[in-house]
């Protein structure tokens, strides 16, 4: 997957666990990318913006 131009960021809460977290890039048209902050050259998950919003909304409700 070509991730050229992706601007990765971590959640502000990730500092509580030593930075072991996921990173998200949501600046590319039509997709939201997610990767493991400990393995930045490993796999990348790709979601549609609608699927990502649904996931985040559900995670907030159950947290």
Image (tube, rainbow, N blue to C red):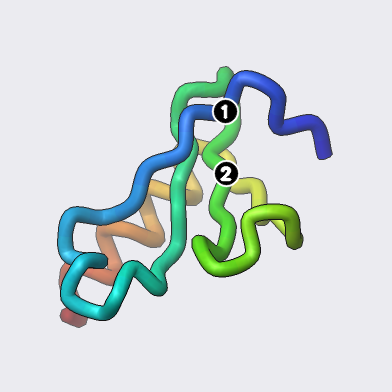
- The residue lying furthest to the right in this view is 1
> Where the N terminus falls, by quadrant?
top right
| Badge 1 element | loop
The local secondary structure at tag 2 comes to strand
Q: Which residue is mark 2?
A: 33
Q: Quadrant of residue 62?
A: bottom left
Mark with earlier residue (1, 2): 1
Specify the farthest residue to the front: 18
| Residue 8: % across, % down | 46, 38
Total marks placed: 2
Label 1 Cα neighbours within 10 Å, binned few <14 / some 14-19 / many ≥20: some
Q: Residue at x 57, y 40 (%)?
A: 48
Q: Which residue is mark 1?
A: 6
Horizontal side of residue 26 vs 15, given as left or right: right
State the residue at coordinates (26%, 59%): 57
Q: Is residue 62 above or below residue 28?
A: below
Q: Which image quadrant: the C terminus?
A: bottom left
Image position, residue 51 (x, y; %): 49, 49
Q: Position of residue 7 (x, y in %)?
A: 48, 29
User: Percent x, y for residue 47?
Assistant: 59, 47
Residue contact at pointers 1 and 2, CB within 8 angstroms: yes
Q: Nearer the viewer, mark 1 or mark 2?
A: 1
Q: Which mark is residue 41?
A: none
């Amino acid at each position: 997957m070509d991730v050229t131009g992706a601007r990765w960021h971590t959640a502000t809460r990730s500092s509580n666990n030593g930075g072991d977290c996921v990173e998200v890039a949501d600046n590319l048209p039509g997709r939201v990318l997610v990767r493991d902050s400990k393995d930045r050259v490993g796999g990348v998950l790709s979601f549609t913006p609608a699927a990502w919003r649904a996931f985040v909304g559900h995670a907030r409700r159950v947290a």
